[in-house]
Image: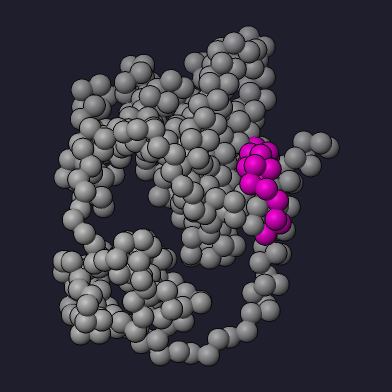
Amino acid sequence: MRLRLVALLPLLVLLSMIGATAPAAAQETPEPESSPTAPSLDDPPDGSYFDVTLIDRSQGGEGTPLVGVTLEVTDADGTFVSGGTTGDGGRVFLPIPGGGTYTVAVDEDALPADVSLRGDPSLTKTVILEGRQVLQFPIGLGDTVTTPVLNRILQGLANGTKEGLIIALAGLGLSLIFGTTGLTNFAHGEYVTFGAVVALFINVYAGIPVVVAVIAAVIVGAAFGYASDAGLWRPLRRKGVGIIAMMIVSIGLALFLRSIFQYLIGTQNRALSDFVVQRRVDFGPFALTPKAIWIIVICLVVITAVSFGLMKTRMGKATRAVSDNPALAAASGINVDAVIRNVWMLAAGLTALAGALLAIDRQASYAMGLNLLLLIFAGVTLGGLGTIWGALLGSLMIGLVVEIVPLFGVPADLKFAGALVILIFILLVRPQGILGRRERIG
């Protein structure tokens, strides 16, 4: 009975979140349609849009907002898309229909006489993901102070360590599932989003401190892992469904969960209430925000504890036995189904923690798990599928590469490609991954 209640817990949480959003949607009153040249500053448009703020910093300090400056957006063919005029705070929202390449241009004639742009009055940006797109025009800035190359590299290493540890948390769960079941779970990214969404609702909508929200997200995430195994994966295993078919099922599960998350929080990014803006702590050649420091510490503590548990505890030894040879483990008296159930709970809890920490570091988004999934797969594959230490090492390498490659002239939009190039190169030399075992190939 208790296990059934645990399995129902994530379902009840999802229903409660849907119920919390439904009344709000029902009470919304339609806003009067506004001209595309005068978007509201208090209510950003739905869908995709450019968020532009014009600040004159020629006098130093926080600068002076430029009010009444006209901007317009054109597409790749030069067709007018939208326009707007900056209001109080020098801010304007410029709606766009979705993905594509757009050019945002400032009307220089509308600028004050003593203010000039430093650089091109138009910026071109390729939009891939929906939602808010931030643009900044350099206005009245003095000479740029060049950061030493060594400091930039150290800052990239610090940011890459944080990124890699978050990937490692989620990758550890993916590696555990693959090692015990042989399943490559394409819905694993949605487990990341699940943790972020649960933390968001508990923190923002319920008004509970973020620390409690993160702990609750881990507990609910573990319950969600148990429910998904009991309701979906274990019945499929018992019916003898092949791994390829189960992979296709995981893709369908990912699409289903992503649609639910999009309904719950919409297409815009959502910030947790306690971590919006923080001042960085200076460590000399690099700097980190307090939340980034806590994320690194939490990831290190959790990964160390899980690794120790897998190496030293009875449950950990049983898990490694099932990963090596399920038939032999069962013949030795190990309850394979119980081990797999516990692995799903542990993996989902770790992945939910990664999602909650990612929401703290950035913001919660319905597609955040999808965006991280490729890096998780790359880290686990690079380190060696099914190996715990391989998942950790590969994820750290991917996180570092993603943050370091832009320092060597690679465009920021292509930094993920650098990680995949490293992955391909290493797999050509060592197909089983850095710490993988050759018998795992195929």
Image side of residue 136 versus residue 346, left or right = left
Instruction: Examine the rendering and report whether any part of residue 35 can be seen.
Output: yes
Image side of residue 277 versus residue 346, left or right = left
- Identify whether 178 is placed above or below 127: above
Task: Give the overall secondary structure of the magenta segment.
Answer: helix
Q: Please give the count of numbered marks on the rendered protein.
A: 0
Q: Nearer the viewer, residue 431 or 135?
A: 135
| Color style of the picture | one colour
Q: Nearer the viewer, residue 259 or 99?
A: 99
Segment tinted magenta in the rendering: 205-224
Q: Nearer the viewer, residue 431 or 56?
A: 56
Residue 414 forms part of the magenta stretch: no
Q: Position of residue 76 (x, y in %)?
A: 19, 74
Q: Position of residue 197 (x, y in %)?
A: 59, 52
Q: Position of residue 295 (x, y in %)?
A: 51, 36
The outermost residue toward the right is 1
For image coordinates 44% across by 39% down, the residue present is 281
Image side of residue 302 versus residue 377, left or right = right
- Identify whether 182 is placed above or below 208: above
- Identify whether 410 is placed above or below 123: above
For image coordinates 36% across by 87% down, the residue present is 37
Residue 222 forms part of the magenta stretch: yes
- Identify whether 271 is placed above or below 189: below
For image coordinates 35% across by 33% down, the residue present is 284
Instruction: Examine the rendering and report whether any part of residue 235 can be seen.
Output: no
Image side of residue 77 versus residue 238, left or right = left
For image coordinates 83% across by 37% down, the residue present is 1
Placement of the C terminus among the 4 image quadrants? top left
Q: Nearer the viewer, residue 390 or 92?
A: 92
The outermost residue toward the front is 59
Q: Position of residue 425 (x, y in %)?
A: 20, 30
